[in-house]
């Protein structure tokens, strides 16, 4: 009996699997590499030179993972900084639409500054191992916040120095 030889189309149809995300594929690859690590240690335990070579490969693998994780965290911090910039600009726009004589104005701006300063503490901690991101946070975000705080303080001083009617 003659068997049918697989064609490209046949193998493509049989190899169709549900779509998996890149993260899922990386996790699966990592799981397989770690299983392989255990197998190599078990199978080559009587060959110390081979085990040493394998361990060097695994150190390189771990270093690559650490670098990938660092890059991913750096990208995430960049996105968070952009989100904070957008949020602060939107809050400033809302504040500018208010009448400074409005009773809520002072309370609202005080809450905004408190919120921004809380975010500053968190972001400084998160950026501590990423000097470029910390410098960007300080310059772009907190520099803007400090300018707004100073402008508000100046306006408050001018308001206090006006004679009451």
Image (cartoon, rainbow, N blue to C red):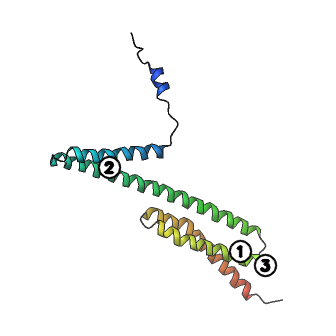
* Total residue callouts: 3
Q: Position of residue 88 (x, y in %)?
A: 63, 65
Which of the 4 image quarters holds residue 141?
A: bottom right
Numbered tag placed on residue 133 in the rendering: none
- Is label 2 in a helix, a strand or a loop? helix
Q: Position of residue 95 (x, y in %)?
A: 72, 69
Q: Nearer the viewer, mark 2 or mark 3?
A: 2
Q: Which residue is mark 2?
A: 61
- Is label 1 in a helix, a strand or a loop? helix
Q: Residues within 10 Å of mark 1 (few under 14, many from 20)?
A: few
Circles 2 and 3: CB distance less than 8 Å? no
Q: Which residue is mark 1?
A: 108
Name which of mark 1 and mark 2 comes first in the sequence.
2
Assign the N terminus to one quadrant of the image: top left
Query: What is the distance, in whole Å, between disc 1 and disc 2 at their CAs?
Result: 51 Å
Q: Residue at x 70, y 80 (%)?
A: 155
Assign the C terminus to one quadrant of the image: bottom right
Q: Nearer the viewer, mark 1 or mark 2?
A: 2
Query: 164 or 92, which lies in front?
Result: 92
Query: 10 or 163, which lies in front?
Result: 10
Q: Residue at x 45, y 21 (%)?
A: 8
Q: Residues within 10 Å of mark 2 (few under 14, many from 20)?
A: some
Numbered tag placed on residue 103 in the rendering: 3
Q: Position of residue 13 (x, y in %)?
A: 50, 25
- Is label 3 in a helix, a strand or a loop? helix
Of all residues, the one furthest to the top in this rendering is 1
Q: Answer with left or right where residue 37 lies relative to residue 3.
A: left
Of all residues, the one furthest to the right in this rendering is 165
Query: What is the distance, in whole Å, between disc 2 and disc 3 at their CAs?
Result: 60 Å
Name which of mark 3 and mark 1 comes first in the sequence.
3
Query: What is the distance, in whole Å, between disc 3 and disc 1 at their CAs?
Result: 9 Å
């Amino acid at each position: 009996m003659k068997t049918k030889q697989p064609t490209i189309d046949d193998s493509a149809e049989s190899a169709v699997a549900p779509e998996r995300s890149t993260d899922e594929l990386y996790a699966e690859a990592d799981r397989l590499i770690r299983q392989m690590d255990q197998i190599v240690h078990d199978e080559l335990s009587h060959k110390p030179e081979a085990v040493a070579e394998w361990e060097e490969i695994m150190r390189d693998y771990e270093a690559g993972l650490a670098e990938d994780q660092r890059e991913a965290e750096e990208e995430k911090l960049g996105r968070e900084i952009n989100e904070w910039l957008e949020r602060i600009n939107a809050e400033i726009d809302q504040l500018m639409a208010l009448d400074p004589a409005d009773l809520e104005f002072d309370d609202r701006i005080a809450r905004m500054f408190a919120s921004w300063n809380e975010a500053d503490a968190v972001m400084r901690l998160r950026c501590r191992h990423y000097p470029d991101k910390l410098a960007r946070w300080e310059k772009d975000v907190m520099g803007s916040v400090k300018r707004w705080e100073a402008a508000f303080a100046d306006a408050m001083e001018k308001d206090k120095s006006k004679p009451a009617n």
